[in-house]
Image: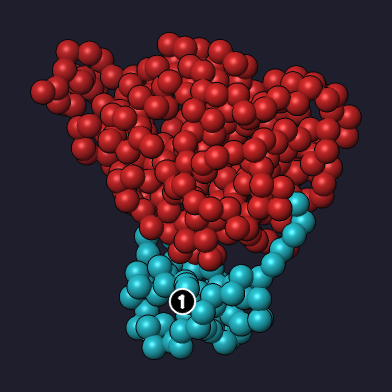
Amino acid sequence: MRILTRRDTGLLTQWTFGSSAIDTDALAFISAASITDLTQQSAIINLVTSLKSNNLWNKFDAIYPFVGGTANSHKYNLIDPRDLDAAFRLNFVGGWTHSSTGALPNGVNAYADTRLSPSSSLNINNTHLSYYSRSNIAITSNRIFFDTFISASNCMQFYFDSALNQVVFDAFNTSDARVSSAFTRTDGFYIGSTTSISNRKIYRNNTILNTNTTTNTLSNLPNIPLFLAAANTTGGAVVFSNLQCAFGSIGDGLNDTEAANFNTIVTTFQTTLGRQV
Amino acid sequence: MTLVYMLTQDQANQLKGVEYTTDMTFNPIQDANGNWIISNEEVSTTTIDWLKELPTIEYIPKVVDFF
């Protein structure tokens, strides 16, 4: 068994995991989120090193691994694990159930505020959202991964639409910047990604569900934060979801290869934690 | 059927933004009939005793369609 140990060496504090030096970003997150379980520590270390070795790490503004089983451990952003709103730490509001398998919003009044506004952090025609859902449910009303909505031409949304019976990714309008697809299950690792003015896709578990190549002409980036599991409107949070989240991310657009590699990395992460679906 | 706890508007105002347990805050909302409510998760986790005496009602979500 390899054990995370600290070795005080004068001015430097060196951490090792077995015989290997630990990635400092992984270590910062493990420390902030107070992750003491060795399997969870190993999963985080492998997640970070795999994202870096696949040249994905710099594509993220926020990664929420939902490891540790408490609101405190789940709130931290892997990319910047400071306990600050400016670091896009999650602010959990309403009824949530936190466990080793993730964070379950109650579908009544729960959401998490990312404090990340697209207008200040994201790029038009080059952005993605991802959500690892552990819930397979019937969609009788809209169920949201991430959402911020000012108007139909000024929004970012990733959600299941009950009227359309489709999964929808809007970045950043609901017409020519929309890609949507039929779906059979609401669990799995969903990615919505836009990589150019005329290329946007939805993936589930490494399968491309649909592509939209319409040229985007009318988007604005919302200046209110993305909410997880509800829609953020100018009037506050509405449309509350009940899909258990075991991973989420916000960042730059991912092409097919990057999305495939990301899916592999996140799937391995969930398998290590024994909570893959 | 999902049961929720019914509040007065004053009680809802009192709870808004208050932490009910570490790193989670109350979120009183209005249901489809205009009742102020909070969820079972919030009431079962909090140490605020008077909340546990609130009446329960069936949750009827407000219909919002802006998509």
- Residue located 39% across and 27% down the image: A267
Residue A201 in view, yes or no: yes
| Of the pair A225 and A242, the residue shown nearer to us | A242
Give the x, y percent position of residue A263.
47, 24
Q: Is residue A181 above or below residue A263?
A: below
Q: Quarter of the image holding residue A23? A: top left
Give the x, y percent position of residue B51.
41, 82
Residue A143 is left or right of residue A104, and the answer is right
Q: Quarter of the image holding residue A120? A: top right
Q: Is residue B11 above or below residue A174?
A: below
Amino acid type at circle 1 is: Leu
Residue A78 is left or right of residue A128, and the answer is left
| Of the pair A47 and A187, the residue shown nearer to us | A187
- Residue located 64% across and 23% down the image: A253
Count of picture labels: 1
- Residue located 14% across and 26% down the image: A3
Neighbour tally class for label 1: few under 14, some 14-19, many 20 plus, Cα within 10 Å: some
Element marked by disc 1: strand
Q: Residue furthest front?
A: A184
Query: Which chain is tinted red?
Result: A
Chain under disc 1? B
In the rendered image, which residue does mark 1 sit on?
Answer: B3
Give the x, y percent position of residue A254.
61, 20
Q: Colour of chain B?
A: cyan
Give the x, y percent position of residue A266.
42, 27
Residue B15 is left or right of residue A129, and the answer is left
| Of the pair B12 and A178, the residue shown nearer to us | A178
Q: Is residue A203 above or below residue B65?
A: above
Q: Residue furthest left?
A: A1
Residue A24 in view, yes or no: no
The scheme the figure's colours follow is by chain
